[in-house]
Amino acid sequence: MSDADTRARPRAAVAAALGLLLAAVPVVLTSASADELLDPLTLVLAACAIVSVLFASDWEGAVDISSAFVCFMLAVAFVGPVGAFAIPIAAEVVTFAVRRYRREALPINLAATAIPSLLAALIYGAVVGTLEDGEPADLAVLALVAIAFLVLNYVTISVLVVLLDGGSLRAALRPPRELLPSLALTVALTVSIAGVFAQLGLAAGAFLVLIIVAFTYMSRLVVIARKRTEEYAAMSWGVLSSLVRALDRRDGRTARHSAAVAAFARDIALECGMSKRDAELAHTAGLLHDIGRFALPDRVMERHGTLTEDDWDAIHQHPELGADLLRDLGVYGPVAEIVRAHHERIDGRGYPRRLKGDEIPEIARIVAVAEVYDTLTTKDTYRDRMTSFQAMTELRRVAGRQLDERFVEALASLLTGRGMDYRHADTADFDSELAIEGRIADSVALDSS
């Protein structure tokens, strides 16, 4: 696209929006009395709409869901065209003055809200007049014009935004299906509030509108909290994956081994009939089980020479250090506890806390089986590589003392009929097992639950 086209687009979008607004002015001036602007209900609805738009809930960064719509529709039903046109303009102008968003977007937002609101008021006035008694037929007409408002609002803003920034009009006009339930509920609430207002008057209607405004504000707080959680989760998982890669540079087996242990641990959990959440917990713990090895001296990581007593002390502390690191970075608690306990033994001779039997978290026992099996069967270990059969023989030999027999047999069942690529996880890939975007989403879901 040329520079001339880039400059021309905003001018064309603004001109189109202003043209729509100017075309509406004569209609407003001839359709009803300007006294509507001084009606107490107009002022109340304008105030509620301004507050609502200022605290609108952002949905996936693209569409604002705001209780201002309720205020617009009440103006349609009870005030008339002048109020229905003026309230959206007042709300958007105040919002622009506070937020100072992109200037070209102001006339587009004005046209996309004020024009549909005006047309809805004209149609409703022609069919019903002013809603007075809350008759079901009159409320049904309000529901229809509310739907028409939403459709026209969406089409207007989509067309003008494409004119402003370019892009596919067809894609922009694709219905936001994920919002349809919310929009249907909003229409139903609007009609219900209008019915209450018609029966009980201004005080009751205004009270309900304020409730909706308060709900909108709370929804915005939830969205903000979710975004901050996503940012924090992304940072945490980015740090953790970087640490594993740094460990891999010191010991070239770390990333592959972590990926393999994660996959085996998840599959063992599923083989035992555990829930999907517990299986994913086992998978995450497998990915991060060796994160505390940063505490190990280089000579231990390189596996050269005889280990000193201090070296063994460092080895015995790395599960504790890994758990502390995970907790400090905000990874949810169960993972840290599993990492802390993955070197404990059934007979109580493990480390760092000498837990035994059922004192050891169940998923930590799964990770222990997965880790020992991968260590025995891989070619990048410091031991002589075993076949899968030899490794399972060894695991069964230590079952009941070092490892949990139940999970050893689950692994044996899992390996039955599997090929060499699965039995010897030489090509396990850390990035594939990490799937960081999914883990960020899971972290947000866990934080919200």
Image: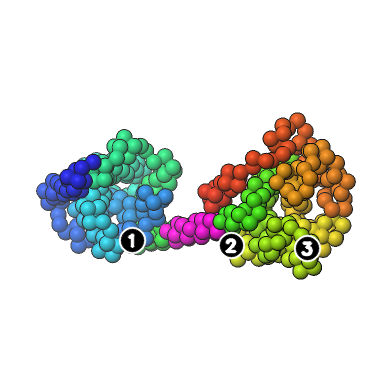
Gap in angstroms between the C-alphas marked 1 and 2: 32 Å
User: Where residue 216 appears, x then y in whole percent?
Assistant: 41, 58
**Mark with earlier residue (3, 1):** 1
**Mark with earlier residue (1, 2):** 1
User: Where residue 70 appears, x then y in whole percent?
Assistant: 34, 52
Disc 1, SS: helix
Residue depicted at 64% across the width and 51% down the height? 252
**Mark with earlier residue (2, 3):** 3
Residue depicted at 85% across the width and 60% down the height? 348
Q: Are marks 2 and 3 in contact (CB under 8 Å)?
A: no
Residue depicted at 52% across the width and 48% down the height? 437
Of labels 2 and 3, the one closer to you: 3
Q: Which part of the image, by quadrant, shows the C terminus?
A: bottom right
Disc 2, SS: loop
Disc 3, SS: loop
Residue where numbered disc 1 is placed: 54
The number of discs equals 3
Residue where numbered disc 3 is placed: 307
Residue 78 visible (yes or no): no
Q: Quadrant of residue 37?
A: bottom left
Is 146 on the left or on the right of 438, as rendered? left
Residue depicted at 58% across the width and 62% down the height? 330
Gap in angstroms between the C-alphas marked 3 and 1: 64 Å
Which residue range is magenta in the image? Answer: 220-240
**Residue 234 is covered by the magenta coloring:** yes
In this view, the residue in front, 138 or 260, is 260
User: Where residue 317 appears, x then y in whole percent?
Assistant: 73, 65
In the image, what residue type sits under mark 2? Gly
Question: Farthest residue in the bottom direction?
Answer: 310
Residue where numbered disc 2 is placed: 330
Is 383 on the left or on the right of 99, as rendered? right
